Amino acid sequence: NTNATSVCCKRNNHSVHKQLLLLLFDRGIIIERLPNRNKMDTDDSDSHDSSDSDDEVPSVTHVEHKQNGNESYKRKDYRSAIAHYTLAIETAKEEQEDEDDPTKKYDPETLATYHNNRAAAFTMILQFDEAVADCDEAINLHAPFLKAHIRKANAQISLGELDHAFASLNKAAIYDPNSSVIISLKNDVEKLQQRVELARSLLNKNRGDYPPFPLPNARDGKQALNQIMVVIGSCPAWRSILVDKTQALLAVGRTNEAYSTTTSLIRSGINSSLLVLYRAYALQQMGNIDDAMKHIKQILSGDPDNKMVANFYKLLRNLSKKKAEADTFYKSKNYEKAVELYSEALELTGCVGQYKAKLYFNRAMASHNLRKHPAVVEDCTNAISLDDEYVKAILRRAGSYLIMGEEADCQKAMNDYQTVMDLAEKRGDGDQMGEMKKKLREAQVQLKRSKQVDFYKILGASRDATESEIKKSYRKSALKWHPDRHTNSSEEEKTKAEKTFRDVNHAYEVLSDPPKKAKYDSGVDIEDLDNPHAGHGHGHGHGGINQNDLFEMFMRQQGGGGGGGFRFG
């Protein structure tokens, strides 16, 4: 029965479509809605009388599937469009297989159009490989199909297959040699090729034996990066060009970004020795020398005769060893030796980037323990120049500025604390922001005190001096400015000595009295130091004792004589 055969064929057609839709669904391509006339959910178990022609299952033609695909494409529902175009292609092929009359078979150009339409939808969801495959199908069906040739070339450009794209355009030109679109695209491809060639020539400029791969100076690296970024704009799916981008990022010092790029490339399946080498270099620049060495070992395990990489490993090992030696002396509180070894490490080849910043900071901490605060400031400044968000170095420098205590130093300390507060706000670190507000208040007190008489400076003592160091400084200054030592000096020099001697004794009177010293350090005005309501707590101190008596008392306590008056010989 002809009707029964027709119904059976259509049922098979719907079954195929069901299977196709499930496959598309598994691949993430979902149809927003089924065609209105297609009854895909027909229960195959339902019985139908083969003689009842009124029970035929309605079918959807390939033309209608194509129209549904066009509607989805216009709505920017590209995945549904792909599914509809796929149904159009499969339906057209089935109709050809079922049709005995050759005059009723589909036109190859029609099927080529469906493939081209699906290629357009694949392009919109950045599936360029699938787009190229569909364009190839369209061209095989209809060789002079210019739209398919051009779409294929554009997809190949997006993939970074510039030579293939140029070849595709040459094939298209056979059918329309005067096409302005083809001519323009060929010019674009040639310019992209020239940009890639220029970038790679710049990146291959080496500046010396280190690092163990070509790395240009920052100017050439920046120019190369600019060229690469233009290429990436036209070739968004070109993964391997990102290896060149990584090299350029390292050249211009954008180390963190270079490291992130290597991570993305490795996850995408690109894992060449050169990429691992770039990653190791980035890790070293970021201060993680141990992980850098692990990456180098990975390369050497597959290429043990690579002398360039072996030398790089040796260089990193020497750096690590020297730093470890310095760290050992620091931990044992031999700060002088630690400073010496950190200095040697800083001079080694390959001491660069954030690793070098860490060594500067470590040396600064050793100098801090030696209370050499100008050296601390210098080293922290060097560290910050290499890593402008090095919070530990910024805070350590601020602390040393406050200990140095001049008005300009205090202002610099406040600037450093504000910098850290801004960085904390950027990270959303409320705890550190609160801590910096407290530090700023303390720095403001120090700034105020820097504008007053500086008792520490008068004694020649540092602001972090211990009690014994304050006594030692007082003895030295008092002996230097005692009036008896200036009996043969000019009247002007005698007057200066007497005034300075009084200032020295006044300074010691305050700094040797813990309560007064605490008030002074907290910013209490000098005239209020004896006020019990000023600052925190109060003491009796030396109560405005006569300056000579204070000196005589001190000298007796120190075993330096007294009584009948101290005299210089």
Image (cartoon, grey):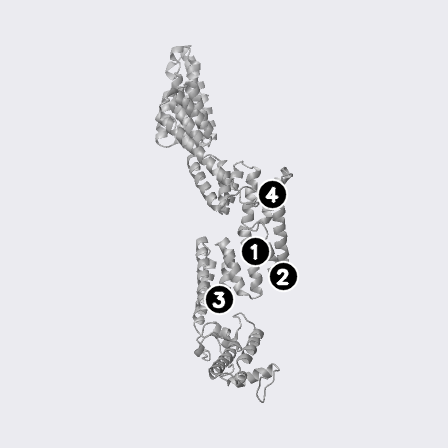
Q: Is residue 386 above or below residue 491?
A: above
In the depicted view, which residue is nearer to us: 115 or 101?
115
Q: Circle 3 sits in a helix, a strand or a loop, which is it?
A: helix
Measured in 3D between alpha carbons, the distance from the residue under mark 2 to the one under mark 3, in whole angstroms, is: 26 Å
Question: How would you rate the neighbour count of disc 1 (Cα within 10 Å): few for under 14, some for 14-19, many for 20 or more?
Answer: many
Tell us which disc is closer to us: 2 or 4: 2
Which of the two labelled residues, at mark 1 and mark 4, occupies the earlier sequence position? 4
Q: Of helix, strand and loop, which one carries label 2?
A: helix
Q: Amino acid at mark 4?
A: Ile
Mark 1 and mark 3 lie on one chain; the one further toward the N terminus is 1
* Residue underneath mark 4: 296
Q: Which residue is mark 2?
A: 337
Residue 402 marker: 3
Viewer can see residue 496 = yes
Tell whether label 4 touches label 1 (CB within 8 Å).
no
Q: Secondary structure at mark 1?
A: helix
The amino acid type of the residue labelled 3 equals Leu
Decide which of tag 2 and tag 3 comes sooner along the chain: 2
